[in-house]
Amino acid sequence: MKLYIKYMVSNRCKALVQQELVSLGLQSEYVVIDLGMVEIHKDITDIQLKQLKDNLGKAGLELLDDSKSILIDKIKKLITDMIHSLEGQPKVNYSVYISERLGYNYNYLANIFSEVKGITIQQFIIIHKIEKAKELLFYDDLSLTEIAHRLHYSSVAHLSSQFKKVTGLSPSFYRHLKDKREGVLENL
């Protein structure tokens, strides 16, 4: 069961949520506490859910209802699927694509996503595109030009700029690290 928590945007918030789960006897039941989200191993009782909602409310956090939680999951899945199937697909406007696929106004989706996750949909897309680029750099022998084309970047410079902003490394240096690791392993 996933619970989404509005305004949960710092490690202090994560610690507070963890403390509330412990106080409700759910310390061994949660799997993941992430910014804006808690994944619990099994269903919790209505009484525990109400108590959690009340206690979080006192701390300035808001437990979101299931419809918003489901919508956030749908947005994330749609983006992840979209990025992993970019190859051979025509370039699309992400906001139009997401809006059309989910049947909601994009501004509405973007506002809910930002409130819950603490980042914009665009930032989430960039992070996942860079993760895909890292995967392609690590496992494939594609050139940066080919990777930029597959991920629908306008240029290698645009890919490199976003890659460095997200990872702190240039794509070439990242690939160099991979080659260096392989060389070390071969010499063992």
Image: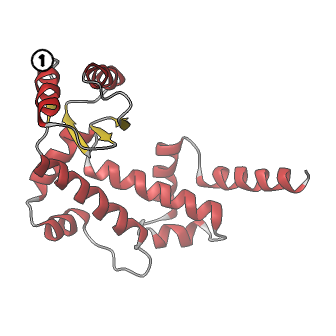
* Nearer the observer, 54 or 43: 43
- State whether residue 66 is above or below residue 137: above
> Quarter of the image holding residue 175?
bottom right
Looking at the picture, how far across and down is residue 83, in whole percent? 39, 66
- Residue placed at 42% from the left, 68% from the top? 84
Looking at the picture, how far across and down is residue 16, in whole percent? 29, 20
- State whether residue 112 is above or below residue 134: above
Tag 1: amino acid: Lys
Give the side of residue 44 with respect to residue 166, left or right. left
> Quarter of the image holding residue 59?
top left
| Pointer 1 local density, CA inside 10 Å: few below 14, some 14–19, many at least 20 | few
- State whether residue 33 is above or below residue 69: above
* Nearer the observer, 48 or 173: 48
Residue at mark 1: 58
Looking at the picture, how far across and down is residue 69, in whole percent? 18, 48
Give the side of residue 15 with respect to residue 115, left or right. right
- Residue placed at 13% from the left, 58% from the top? 106
Question: Residue furthest toward the right?
Answer: 187
Looking at the picture, how far across and down is residue 92, in whole percent? 28, 72
- Residue placed at 21% from the left, 42% from the top? 114
- Residue placed at 25% from the left, 68% from the top? 93
Give the side of residue 143 with respect to residue 117, left or right. right
